Image: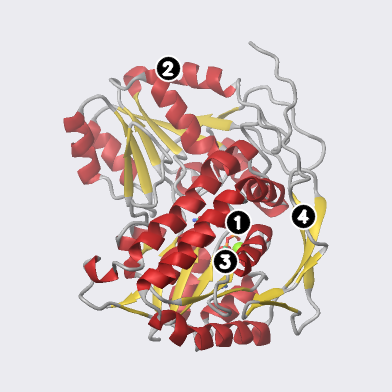
Amino acid sequence: MFEYAPAPESRDIVDIRPSYGLFINGEWVEPQGEERHKTVNPATEEVLAEVAWAGEADVDRAVQAAAKAFPVWSAMPGAERAKYLFRIARIIQERARELAVLETLDNGKPIRESRDVDLPLVAAHFFYYAGWADKLAYAGFGPDPRPLGVAGQVIPWNFPLLMLAWKIAPALACGNTVVLKPAETTPLTALAFADICRQADLPPGVVNIVTGAGGTGAALVNHPGVDKVAFTGSTEVGRLIARSLAGTRKKLTLELGGKAANIVFDDAPLDQAVEGIVNGIFFNQGHVCCAGSRLLVQESIAADLLEALKRRLGTLRLGDPLDKNTDIGAINSAEQLAKIRELSEAGEAEGAERWSPACPIPDRGYWFPPTLFTGVAQSHRIAREEIFGPVLSVLTFRTPAEAVEKANNTPYGLSAGVWTEKASLMLWMASRLRAGVVWSNTFNRFDPASPFGGFKESGYGREGGRHGLEGYLAL
Ligand code: NAI
Ligand code: MG
């Protein structure tokens, strides 16, 4: 095997301010309260910046700015709104390297992923919805679909800028204005996006960014001036939001957790499947709602597949996320690391067998080695609960019907993967799997043109594609 020399991306390209205010009505403003919190680099625990935690009065100010901007923005011809979205997309491309480094610093994900996956998809999403802005009458929602008003959007920390793009691009294309709250551990790329809105000359108030934690998010989604709520995050908080919005006129879309099955049949090309399994659960440290966290492998090939998989896991490089050779970066927070540890310990206690490759762990920061569990029963917590970390539970099956039954035996239903050379089997499986996305001989592949969303406790509504417009239009 080759030795790797360190190849760190330079962080000089990013300019992080020591402290940030809130972005309201096109300006940086000071919050009314005193509360400020530090955001850290999870790979080093170094403090990157201090951000404001917006209170109710700040959220109110942001919602009012968005409401004031709505008449002008929604009345603008779609072709004009499209120009702003195209401009934002191009600025993102121009600043892609800077944004990728910033994302990696604040989130802990490998630069290879922020550079090659997140940022290209962020730009693609804005380009894609720019294309819809002047074609809404042809989107299948009637001849004159209208926007809803002010969208209150709350996003998680696993794909900070990408989730921002998924929320903001369709909202603006449809003529809505936005107040967005990034996650408390990863606010920096959303704050950089505020600068991009200024650079693009976006009219003041069309996009507002308020930082803070759950309290700020609750103030936003419960604000009476908000017409639409879009949330991505835990099922627990999604449930809370659904409960508090029930009976109001607010339109709600929820994208929640998952416990996806990645199903490998005996005729699948093994090496390709191994790559897909690795990408399915170790991409982004497994902090992926649609991660292939349950491997279902046909019994007759289980031993061979596991041997190949273990060999491959031994080659994954864990460490400095800014190093271009790194495959596995840092866990996003101490809280998430504690949760991954707790569930992994439960897996052992319940009788599954735990395995990790030899893998040096850095002294500082939050880290968890790639881990797999064999001998997993469907009743084990590691087979049922979302771990949201680099931990794979391996189960076996004998027949396609058994694979379907096991795959669907979960309260979630966001995604699934099927590996087989037989197209007939593929289609048979896809029509029976209760999952919003079914990947065929691939996994974790995203495209702005293709709708994404869940069944059951994974949420409702779709993001991406023509379907993604629906949540932002009055039908
Ligand atoms: P979370 O659901 O608490 O946080 C997501 C976002 O919601 C953050 O911006 C947070 O500030 C905000 N939020 C929290 N409480 C809120 C409330 N009452 N009202 C409005 N907004 C609120 O998720 P957390 O605590 O970061 O992670 C817990 C678990 O959730 C993870 O271990 C993982 O299993 C799952 N998760 C799933 C995600 C997904 O993409 N489906 C994303 C993040 C977490
Ligand atoms: Mg939480």
403 shown above or below 298: below
Q: CA distance from mark 4 to mark 3?
A: 19 Å
Q: Which mark is residue 200?
A: 3
| Nearest to N terminus: mark 1 or mark 2 | 1
Name the residue rendered at 40%, 25% in the picture.
273
Question: Which residue position is annotated with label 4?
Answer: 15
| Nearest to N terminus: mark 4 or mark 2 | 4
Quarter-of-image position of residue 423: top left
Tell me if mark 3 has few (under 14), some (14-19) or many (20+) residues whose alpha carbon lies within 10 angstroms of its own.
Answer: some
Count of numbered tags = 4
**Which amino acid, by three-letter code, is at mark 3?**
Ala
Q: Residue furthest top?
A: 1
Left or right of 229 in this view: 328: right
Q: Which quarter of the image is occupied by the N terminus?
A: top right
Question: Which residue position is annotated with label 2?
Answer: 303
Decide which of 185, 340 is in the foreground and name it: 185
Q: Are the residues at dot 4 and dot 2 in contact (C-beta closer than 8 Å)? A: no
| Nearest to N terminus: mark 4 or mark 3 | 4
Which label sits in the foreground, 1 or 2? Answer: 1
Name the residue rendered at 62%, 81% in the picture.
25
**Which amino acid, by three-letter code, is at mark 1?**
Trp
Q: Is residue 148 visible?
A: yes
Image coordinates for residue 370, horizontal then vertical, percent: 60, 32
Q: Is mark 1 within 8 Å of ligand 1?
A: yes
Question: Which residue position is annotated with label 1?
Answer: 157
